[in-house]
Amino acid sequence: MPELPEVESIRSVLQGQCKNRIIEESRVEDTRLLQNCTTEQLRHTVEQQTIREVDRIGKYLIFRLDRAALVNHLRMSGRWILEEDDRTRWSLTLDDGNSLYFDDLRRFGTLHLISENPVRKQPPLQKLGLEPTTNDWTLQNFHQLFKTSREIKRMLLDQKRIAGLGNIYSSEVLFRTNLHPEQPVNTISSDRIEQLFRKIPELLQHAIEHRGTSMDDQLYITPSGSPGNFQFQLQVYNREGEPCPRCDTTIERFKQGQRSSYFCPKCQSPPSS
DNA sequence: AGTATAACCTGTCTGC
DNA sequence: TGCAGACAGGTTATAC
């Protein structure tokens, strides 16, 4: 469910809620969440530790403690809320009396407990690709990604190449750069690569300003309970059968690698063979 | 290196 | 109304 803008929106609320707070209690309700530790190990490591920072890398949330870090992925349905409900899988009680609850309807969410020395060098973060919102996002680095014959939509979704894009923002950025989802990346011109290079962070930033996309506000809300509103800015995603906002041609959908791709057949002409 | 498939779960929507 | 099947924002393991 959540892609970079949604995770970033969650991160900033969590940061305000728990920066410099001490974790008094960690309570795991569903051990399937835990990838590399037991409930006891987690409790032992985090209780009475201070949360120094809540960071984000790609779609991962990172709670930095003094001597460890908690790396959490929301997958399809994970969310953080401030009130317990019947889908709570994990909760953290803080020293100000407040609690944070990790909620996960589909139970795909994950938690890794890792040591603090460069988190980026350890699983599950070690293989993540370029971050659109950091200094690594240079045109030179970006160009390196275009040497294979993969289809552009699949390449954008590959977290080992670019960290943070999911199905919604991939479809949207391709529309905004007039690229067909099936265009092989090694046939894309330098000009077009440069456009993508600029549009990806621009789109993500724009979406962050709208607190991300809440297609179904039962699923994605920020911890303070606010839904995003970028769904009203979407131009092709989830708009099959509706007119293209630029040319009125009917938006189409097709399956690409088990995922739905949406595009305007006129603005995004298919790769010429 | 690439792709295709299934798997992890639960809920909702569609069509018969 | 009931029920089967498809589908959903993500990622990974496995088998070609």
Image: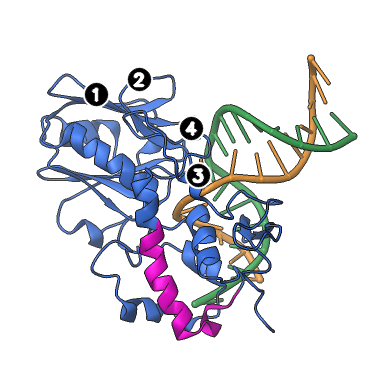
Chain colours: A blue, B green, C orange
Residue sitting at x 42%, y 62%: A159
Question: Do dots 4 and 2 share one subunit?
Answer: yes
Q: In whole angstroms, how far apart are the C-alphas of marks 4 and 1?
A: 22 Å
Chain letter belonging to callout 4: A
C-beta proximity under 8 Å, tags 1 and 3: no
Q: How far across and how far down the image is residue A74, in percent?
A: 40, 42
Callout 3 amino acid: Gln
- Is A232 magenta? The answer is no
Instruction: State which mark lies toward you, 1 or 3.
Output: 3
Regarding mark 4 in the picture, which secondary structure is present there? loop
- Magenta segment range? A183-203
Label number found at residue A231: 3
What residue type is disc 4 on? Asp
- Mark nearer the N terminus (4 vs 3): 4
| Quarter assignment of residue A230 | top left
Q: Tell me, for residue A99, which label it has, or none.
A: 1
Can you identify the residue that label 4 sits on? A217
Give whichever of discs 4 and 1 has the lower sequence position. Answer: 1
- Circle 2 residue: A84
Give the amino acid type for the residue marked by disc 1 in the picture. Ser
Whether residue A151 is visible: yes
Which of A113 and A221 lies nearest the eye of the viewer? A221
Nearer mark to the viewer, of 4 and 2: 4
